[in-house]
Image: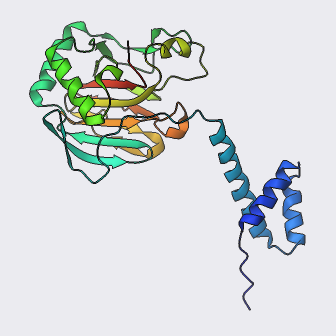
Amino acid sequence: MQPAVQTITPELRRWIVAQAEAGCQPEEVVQAMVASGWHEDVAVEALEQTLRGRLEEVRQLQLAPAAAVPEPSVGEGATVIEADGHPVDVVMALKHPRVVVFGNLLTAAECDELMALSRPRLERSETVDTATGGSEVNAARTSDGMFFERGEHPLIARIERRIAALLNWPVEYGEGLQILRYRPGARYEPHYDYFDPEKSGTPRILERGGQRVGTLVMYLNTPARGGSTTFPDAGLEVAPVRGSAVFFSYERPHPSTRTLHGGAPVLAGEKWVATKWLREGVFR
């Protein structure tokens, strides 16, 4: 005769939480369940599931409130989005993390012009120093880069209008466009784009427009080999294809957004990208 199946009920979960909050040790809770007729393996599983779930609930309560984020109009299975008169292909979309891959965001001529305009101004890339609110050269980022002021050139203004229409986010909420060149062997170690609330320099950074809530990385060329944008928490790699782009958003400055990402090493040739960061409010 098969033993009766024992179900982990909501009532049992509430009882386990109550025992844990009363200070009972896990082995004591399991022993009490076994003495009441529960199979030991079911008791252990119930304990682990319940306490893991309770920890997640507590962690969620401690998170900052979710912010509004940029969101492209892909909710109804759109394959092409008309962005300021320019058709952009929707290649792939994930919900969590929120990642959308676009094709044909930039034309070949636009990619060439961006590289030509930025080339004379390239310098060793820096990252934001959240301890001071300034910037610094970081060994984790081995690229050359520069920033365009928002709207400083007709090409920049046109691309920024297109991005705003594509992501449903105001132009003035965007930082200046950054151009990066990665030579062979260059990479960017996995990191988050939001500003860490625990760092002393973050309040100063947030004065210019609030938190970052979204990132758009546009590929200006196709490297001979390597250079993918990686999302370790999602097991995702986005190949750098000329004219395409990857967008991701993060509703709070916390790892729960699963937006850890990096630039894999360029193995042959160069990789050129244009990055647009989106803020909560007007960026000045």
Which quadrant holds residue 12? Answer: bottom right
Q: Total number of numbered labels?
A: 0
- In the image, residue 7 sits, relative to residue 46, either above or below, namely below
Task: Tell me where residue 271 appears, x and y as whole percent.
Answer: 25, 26
Direction from residue 22 to residue 173 in the image, left or right: left
Seen at 69% across and 58% down, the residue is 49
Which quadrant holds residue 43? Answer: bottom right
| 73 and 153: which is toward the camera | 73
Task: Tell me where residue 262 appears, x and y as whole percent.
Answer: 41, 31
Seen at 50% across and 39% down, the residue is 257
Task: Tell me where residue 149 appears, x and y as whole percent.
Answer: 27, 11
The N terminus - image quarter: bottom right
Seen at 88% across and 49% down, the residue is 22
Direction from residue 42 to residue 128 in the image, left or right: left
Residue most extreme to the left:
109
Direction from residue 110 to residue 35 in the image, left or right: right
The C terminus - image quarter: top left
| 251 and 232: which is toward the camera | 251
- In the image, residue 23 sits, relative to residue 181, either above or below, namely below
Which quadrant holds residue 111? Answer: top left
- In the image, residue 2 sits, relative to residue 225, either above or below, namely below
Seen at 76% across and 69% down, the residue is 41
Task: Tell me where residue 90 appears, x and y as whole percent.
Answer: 24, 45
